[in-house]
Image (cartoon, helix red, strand yellow):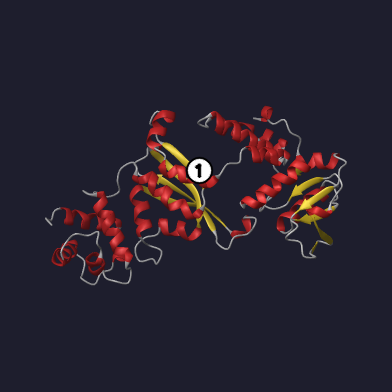
Amino acid sequence: MIEKIKEENVWDFLKNDNKPIMIYGMGNGAEKIISTLDTYGVKVSEIFASDEFVRGHSFLGYKVLKYSDIYDDFNVVLAFATHLENVIENIKKINNEHKVFAPDVPVCGGGLFTKEYVKEHNDEFDFVYNNLADEKSKSDYVDIINFKVSGKVDYLLKSYCDKDSVYKDILKLDICKLAEEKNQGKPIKVVANLPYYITTPIIMGLFESHVPLDSITIMVQKEVADRMQTGPGSKDYGALSLAVQFYAKPEIVVNVPPECFMPRPNVGSAVIRLKRHETRPVDVKDEKLMFRIIRASFNQRRKTLANGLNNSPEIGYTKEQIAAAIEELGRGASIRGEALTLEEFARLSNIFSSMSK
């Protein structure tokens, strides 16, 4: 991999270049960048922000300027992350007028991403590169590493795409067909950092479409990770817990606190690994029926299991049949769905399957 990295370390470039350095943005990111530049003996000339944002601010002793107030030739160092289209367009505009750098600084922990770091871990980088499925992925991978070394946003913009269209497409994509074409149908490992709002549909889509999976490793909101691995009796226990545990063994790999992100979110996160079961953990005759029962049981958590099933349009059994099935399960009439294990839901489903409607 090191032979594909042609760029100079961003910190060395900024030190050796004779242009003034202007920091774009304020906050924790700017503090870390200014501190790192200081260790290289590099002083920042000015700090600026978007014209519409500046209201007489000062930051670390600098008067915050408007971009339109700066006329000299200079290098721009971006000190924040963004997903907003209008801000990205503004960064592109500035990059057309000046060189824009976005140095990779550690949000938590230490160590800079430099050519020396790439060289030290060259075998690991090569391993990832050689296991990517297509040339576009490999090209983007090299661009991102060059970006992290050089800080040049040109590399980042080159690999940029409309993420919403990508995430919508993954829900429509025939992953089974892709796995057959690209991996000869062998089990695949899914590793992703997804927008939290679409994580569950993607996970369940992969499981329910019976994609040949070995495991899924993703970052999710901490409370979602807790729900995936919890059991009966917990307030976090629900339909998601049972669905995930039917298909896989969930394990939280590491908790990621808010201070590890920039900007800092209001919620904690966790990396969770879902290792696909080699054989089903329960014997169930009708998988779809079982999940209809599970959904009905948790749609009205405060009601008894019998009432939840009776009130659900997805359950086509009579009140008497429902009562008889719960009795055959060995549970009392007052039991709630949140008290049942996955095995009990499977048994309940099998009892219903043996009944005639």
Q: Residue at x 88, y 41 (%)?
A: 18
Q: Quadrant of the C terminus?
A: bottom left
Q: Where residue 93 sits in the image (x, y, percent)?
A: 72, 45
Tell me which amino acid carries mark 1.
Val
Which quadrant holds residue 179?
A: top left
User: Can the viewer see residue 127?
Assistant: no
Furthest-left residue in this view: 356
Q: Residue at x 38, y 66 (%)?
A: 234
Give the vertical position of 237 relative to 137 (above or below): below
Give the camera-side residue of 39 and 144.
Answer: 144
Going by the image, does 285 lie left or right of 33?
A: left
Q: Residue at x 65, y 55 (%)?
A: 262
Give the camera-side residue of 329 and 82.
Answer: 82
Q: Where residue 25 sits in the image (x, y, percent)?
A: 74, 55
Going by the image, does 42 lie left or right of 259?
A: right
* SS label for mark 1: helix
User: Can the viewer see residue 173?
Assistant: yes
Q: Where residue 45 sits in the image (x, y, percent)?
A: 86, 52
Q: Residue at x 46, y 51 (%)?
A: 199
The number of numbered discs placed on residues in the rendered structure image is: 1
Give the camera-side residue of 104 and 171.
Answer: 171
Which quadrant holds residue 62?
A: bottom right
Q: Quadrant of the N terminus?
A: top right
Q: Residues within 10 Å of mark 1 (few under 14, many from 20)?
A: few
- Residue on which disc 1 sits: 166
Q: Where residue 223 sits in the image (x, y, percent)?
A: 47, 61
